Amino acid sequence: MIFWNGPYNRLLRLAFVFALVPWLYSTFNEQRRIQSYSVERALMLSWDKIVSQPSIFFRRVIVGINCNVDLIVSGTALLEHINSTTTERKDHEVLTNINDLYEAFTYFFSRGAPSERHMSDEKTFQDLVQTAGDLLQRSHYYIGGNAALMSEKIASSFPKTTTYLVGPIGPRLQALLHPSIVRTNSTRIVKDELHVIMEYKQGEILGEYVAPASSRFITSHDRYSGSSVVIEMFFKAISQFNPDLIILTGVHLLKHQNREMRMEKLRLIKRNLMQVDPKVPVHLEMGSISDSDYVQEVLKRIIPHVDSLALNEQELAFFSHVANGPYGDLYPMSPGAVHVHKVVEILYWLITTYGYDKTNPSSANYGYKLSRIHFHSLTFHLMVYRGTDWSNLGAALAAGARAAARQACQATADNNMDNVELRSSISLLLDKQLGKYYNFEPQKPLVSWMRNDVVFVYTPVLVCKFPTRTVGLDDVISATGLLFSQFYRFERSSAWHKLTEIISEVEESTRKCYESVKPVNKLVLCFVRNIRQAAKKSKTDLKYTTGSNRGPVQWIEDAASYSDAFSTDIDSFATFPYPRQVRRFILIYNYALIHRMKTAAKVKEGLQKQKEKKINFCHLPIEKQVVILFPGQGSQFIGMGSKACISVILQRFLTECPTAMDLYEKASEVLKYDVKKLCFEGPKTKIDQTIYCQPAVFVTSMAAMEKAKQDDEHLMEKVTYSAGFSVGEFNSLVLAGVLSFEDALRILKVRAETMHDCSQKVPSGMMTIQVHASTDLTSAIHDSRKFAIEQNDYSLCEIANFLFCGVKVIGASKVCMDFLEQNQDRYGFKVLKRLSVGGAFHTKLMKGAKSSLRKIFEEVQFKKPKINIFSNYTGHLYNDDINAIKSNLVKQVYNPVKWEQIQQLLFRLHEDCNFPTYMEVGPGRQLGTMFLRISKKAFKFYRNVSC
């Protein structure tokens, strides 16, 4: 026995003290160390602690049914290369032509919302794929389709789980998939199904719209993913593979088929779902659906018969919109305007309406299975469950949120944390009915609560600032959350039926024809006969198995080149329903055909390069290039130009700048009044008038440019780009050599006079407003026009200027401006100020100036630009087409100034961390202030030439 107080135990006591002190230091210092971390890193570390492996995990998972290959391109770049004749934004359930694609893409692009639409016309889709391929220097193909993406994630991240994939797998996809994924030859196809993924990043520009968030738009023309053969093969494989978890995807792809066909397939899916062993959970991964009738059928026939469901904000909002759920008017949701308490209300409605209810055996819900919903949006995730079948869902939610950051930005607790940010409020309302609030703590990110028998778990999410890809992120989140979940169900029903429908194998019967039938045409007929027999037995539609009315040969012709089928050739397990010699002949034929098409495309590309808009200055390093910015009307002040007439030269003596003084003298001769005196002395009431202001600002900016050239003799050798705001665009044209100073001044004199005359027709003005994600500016403008009509006034209310993110200028009649000021809280915007201008410039009120401008344009000479200049009307660079320059200058008067879009393009001129010098030349610093709001990095290279 050891006596603690004994004198011979002194050494033991000292040892205990020396062991205790470090332990206490480590324990009490842990909290302080965590508090020193950034919020993002602390949040990631908290998720790492929360994530724990389930005690019973899924060892065998079967996934189906949609597989394809994604061709990922820049959505804005692709649309700029297609011949669209529309500028509207409108949602379409099905795309029939290029205009529909442009309108649907713009509709979701302006909201930053993900979406997917089917292209009904195959030729249009193939042309789109060809354009996308030509747009890329090298085609970028990736694994696509919910089933393939989820299989890839499970196989690569959960090696103890065996994954069985059922779906139309082509040669490219065969080579891209993880080698451990088990595949079936019964659903192999000769050519991959392609999806065009049109990605865009936050801040990208399309026409007059700027993307509020990074997202993507998907279009496709699938033939096999929604076929009855693939669906039946999937459920047949379930009985053969005996999985622990079933993941069903691709149900949304049936929406583009006719009603009778898709109803038959929904009944087929429901019938097979009800025959699945109730001890095996079924998870449904939703996709974008635009058909309200089809959504009703999915909610009624499919959702109640799956155990788990995963969906995003767009799909959830559309469910509620179609089925008259709460907050049904939220569709389509904007990523930045998703309120947690509204999502919670919709999820509660969804799981109580279509989920399992054990409290009432006589209700229809007692036979339902849905008991888990995994909701994911850009800024937060929610896990909702009911009953006792599912567990470890807190860890599953944290694992999914962590996977989102890792997938989008490769962020971990140790690196790349600068690329992610938290876009969640410190305090927010979670459940309005219960009055549940959430106060953010990085060390405790998860919060859970219960409403009746439904449990909710919430976590904020780290958002990637510059995501490399957004497609497939939902599938990664869902797959990770599923594999960290735990499922165990006590059998509720003894009824369990195995699959009884067996599809005959086409390959076996076709092989028998090989020995007896040698000619290609007879072999094809034999192949078609076997397909028809299988289709008749499985009640499928030949339209989706043999290529519609173009005949079965299309199955073989779909293998367009040797590269398409290369991975299949080297796969010893690959089989074809026709001899290798037949494929070789058709591949050689198609190779020659495609080679001829590519040659013609190269010739066309060469002709297009001759019309290239951008003038190349690659001989100048980007850090040595100079971008000149000219201000517009509104920057004037008394005394402007006085500094431009003096220049700092040798030994710092101040002397007059003679070239600047000459400009004022020339301007006075053209305008027939003393411009120099007006600019230097005023009065202000006169210089603020449009007919005097526009020429005065133009002349002063050119004088400041002369001062800058005298201060730096080599300045013009470094100028590569120029942009001017409204009137300042004429300064850019003079700088680029398109117009002479005198001709530009004559045009501006006519422009100012005609715009002044137009503004006198209706009492009007302009106002600056600030908008945010929840602002309904479209409705505000529409209602103000309606109000003006009711007041028997001129209904004028339009966006006149896009200044920078969240700030716009409205041009409107006085009645409409009064309406907007009085109702700004109702529509969610803020009026910053009314501008001191004499009319609603850059609106339809100015259309009366067209004829006068066109007439004066015919009297002056235009030349091709020597540097790159931006058009206020298009927001893009001018090309060297003189007629296009004239046309854009006319349209600029009665269309909005796209300055925000121009600034975004100016910011993108940088190469890595090297930027050009951005020099504002003219009165004031307004353009520099706006440029600061676009990019603080670029603003470091901003300079101002004072005048």
Image (cartoon, grey):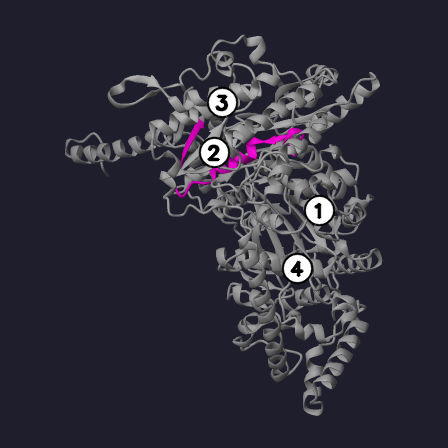
Q: Which residue is mark 1?
A: 85
Sequence order check: which comes first, mark 1 or mark 4?
1
Q: Looking at the picture, which amino acid does disc 4 mark?
A: Asp
Magenta stretch encompasses residue 907: yes
Tell me where residue 176 appears, x and y as whole percent.
52, 64
Q: Nearer the viewer, residue 305 or 566?
A: 566
| Whole-number angstrom distance, CA of label 1 to CA of label 2 | 33 Å
> Is label 1 in a helix, a strand or a loop?
loop
| Whole-number angstrom distance, CA of label 4 to CA of label 2 | 41 Å
Q: Residue at x 59, y 65 (%)?
A: 600
Of badges 4 and 2, nearer the viewer stands 2
Tell me where residue 278 appears, x and y as whole percent.
70, 56
Q: Height in image: 403 above or below 571?
A: above
Within-10-Å neighbours for mark 2: few <14, some 14–19, many 20+:
many
Q: Which residue is mark 3?
A: 666
Of badges 4 and 3, nearer the viewer stands 3
Q: Which residue is mark 4?
A: 127
Q: Nearer the viewer, residue 463 or 822?
A: 822
Within-10-Å neighbours for mark 4: few <14, some 14–19, many 20+:
few
Residues at marks 1 and 4 touching, judged by CB atoms closer than 8 Å = no
Magenta stretch encompasses residue 80: no
Residues at marks 1 and 2 touching, judged by CB atoms closer than 8 Å = no
Sequence order check: which comes first, mark 4 or mark 3?
4
Of badges 1 and 4, nearer the viewer stands 1
| Whole-number angstrom distance, CA of label 3 to CA of label 2 | 17 Å
Q: Quadrant of the C terminus?
A: top left
Magenta stretch bounds: 891-920
Q: Nearer the viewer, residue 145 or 835?
A: 835
